[in-house]
Amino acid sequence: MGEEQAEAPRWDEDLGDHVLSRVEVSQANIRYHAAMAERYDRDQPHFKPENQEQVVVKLLALGSRFGFDGLLDIGCGTGFVTRLAQRYYKETVVTAVKV
């Protein structure tokens, strides 16, 4: 059977000189985002109206340059860009890939 892996340090733990492995970083990232999932849409800076306005400006600039027929959001996270884009683009597609 596979080897057991020790639990990664907490994301807010003082690690001193310890260098985190890729697995430890991934596990800490999962714990961090799971802990904040319920308040993420409310607390993250990109959900503030003034920041969303900046994203809309960029979406409109892209549409003006390349057309408003469609937008493909790769690595969409919570999909907030896609939700904003739906107002302006004929078709929006979300592609979520977990690596």
Image (cartoon, helix red, strand yellow):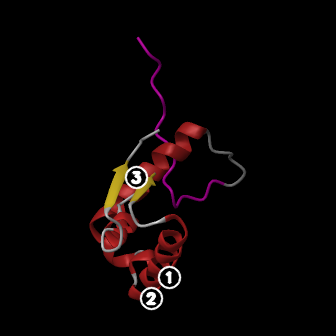
What residue sits 42% from the left and 41% below the top?
Answer: 98
Crowd rating for badge 3 (residues with CA inside 10 Å; few <14, some 14–19, many 20+):
some
Q: Which mark is residue 50?
A: 2
Label 1 neighbourhood size at 10 Å, few (<14), some (14-19), many (20+)?
few
SS type, badge 1: helix
The disc, 2 or 3, on the residue closer to the chain's N-terminal end is: 3
- The amino acid marked with disc number 3 is Arg
Residue at the disc numbered 1: 54
Residues in magenta, as a range:
1-15
Q: CA distance from mark 1 to mark 2?
A: 7 Å
**Nearer the camera: disc 1 or disc 2:** 1
Find the distance from the CA under tag 3 to the CA under tag 1.
30 Å
Q: Nearer the viewer, residue 41 or 71?
A: 71
Q: Earlier in the sequence, mark 3 or mark 1?
A: 3
User: Disc 1 residue type?
Assistant: Gln
Query: Percent from the top left, x then y, of residue 72?
Result: 42, 54
> Which mark is nearer the camera, 3 or 1?
1
Q: Return the residue found at the far top.
A: 1
Dot 3: what SS?
Answer: helix
Disc 3 designates what residue?
31
Please say whether residue 76 is visible from this viewpoint: no
Q: CA distance from mark 2 to mark 3?
A: 29 Å
